[in-house]
Amino acid sequence: MATACQPPEGAAVTSPPSYQQADLRRDTSALQALGITGVQARVTTASGRDLVAATGVAVAGTNRPVPHDGYFRIASTGKALMATVILQLADEGQLSLDDMVDRWMPGVIDGNGNDGRKITVRQLLQNTSGLHDDLPGFDTPQQYYQHRYDTYTPEQIVARAMKHHPDFQPGTGWSYSNTGYVVLGMIVEKATSRPWQEEVESRILKPLGMNHTYLPGTTSTLRRPHADGYQVFTSGERTNVTEQIVPDLGGYVSTTADVNRFFRGLLGGKLLSEARMAEMRDTVPVAKQLEAIWPGGSYGLGLVNRPLTCGGSYWSHEGGEAGYITLNGATDDGSRTVTVSMTTSFNDFDKTLRQHKAASDLVDHALCDTSSNRQGK
């Protein structure tokens, strides 16, 4: 007979999860304390149960709470979506990762030492192409108000990069290149004869039930509910930058639940074959300037690998755009995922570094799920 302190014979003995709601609130509050207007975070556990927390305010100067299921711009997290589509097309034989860019887009990468005959699709995916980044952005509030409704075609964005020499010869270094992923979108359209956004929707969003992920196009506002996004410029002035038109690949809007759903599906084997998943996870070291943001990080094909303090590593792809900063992470099999969205970005590297460190700590605590994390050690 079992006693009150002993489970019945043969029963599974389980311990309570170490990372709980109070821990998530603690970690989101630590982010808010850095001067971030609003924070929302979601941890999806192996059982499918969610821990959700939100701190701060949705609109500066009000008491309006940050919605737990609010929309936000995921920015470069969208690169993982693009990479998944490319790898699916490779699996189907519609393209090869070793194709040169010029096979699909002849003459587009040309001039100032740039040569599409020497850059492969794989190098675009892994940020080893050497293509320089020259994306439009805002350094002052005045620039934001003057240019927030500007639009750019993929060709225009690539043309901006062609005004610069490559950062290095293809395959000889690593540098983060948004331009490279714009070129990948152009290749998807050539290979499928469909807009790349339609490929993302039919191949990823619909199969995974990501019903709250969308591209706003030329709509400058977000669906409700959402917290507003803010940028603190070098002058120290905090500006509401929510309303703007973001170039398409960086413009995806989503929720913490949908982002977790994506990484859970991707790493859980629902989107790619084992062979393609292995290629996606084949990483190279990132450049030194990103080591400060991603300590110990390495980059695969649209996926970032980062070490966990409890051993092992996790997979992610963060993003930052229009006042929204997103960090996320998933265990190797996608069984445990976490996404944190912050509604303030800084034009100050030290503040940005502290923000990323605190958000990375949240991801680490949630994925390690150890009792030491509960104690804040």
Image (cartoon, grey):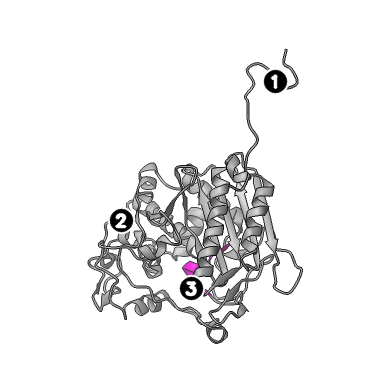
Residue 337 visible? The answer is no
Front in this rendered view, residue 56 or 179: 56
Q: What residue type is labelled 3?
A: Pro
Figure check: 12 above or below 197: above
Residue 281: x percent and y percent?
Answer: 38, 49
Crowd rating for badge 1 (residues with CA inside 10 Å; few <14, some 14–19, many 20+): few
**Element type at marker 2?**
loop
Q: Tag 2: residue type?
A: Leu
In front here: 35 or 262? Answer: 35
Residue 257 covered by magenta stretch? no
Query: Where does label 3 land, which residue?
Result: 247
Amino acid type shown at disc 1? Gln
Identify the residue at image location x=35%, y=44%.
275
Mark 3 vs 1, N-terminal side: 1
Give the farthest residue toward the top: 1
Would you name the residue on which mark 1 appears? 6
Helix, strand or loop at mark 1: loop
Query: Where residue 346 appears, x then y in whole percent?
Result: 54, 72
The x and y percentages for residue 263 are 51, 50
The nearer-to-camera label among 3 and 1 is 1
Which percent across, then down, holds residue 11?
A: 64, 21
Per the rendered image, the range of residues in magenta is 246-254
User: What's the distance in space between the residues labelled 2 and 3, CA to CA?
Assistant: 25 Å
Label 3 to label 1: alpha-carbon separation: 60 Å
Quadrant housing residue 33: bottom right
Q: Nearer the viewer, residue 300 or 348?
A: 348
* Quarter of the picture holding the N terminus: top right
Left or right: residue 9 compared with residue 137: right
Q: Mark 2 points at which residue?
A: 97
From this viewpoint, is residue 272 visible? yes
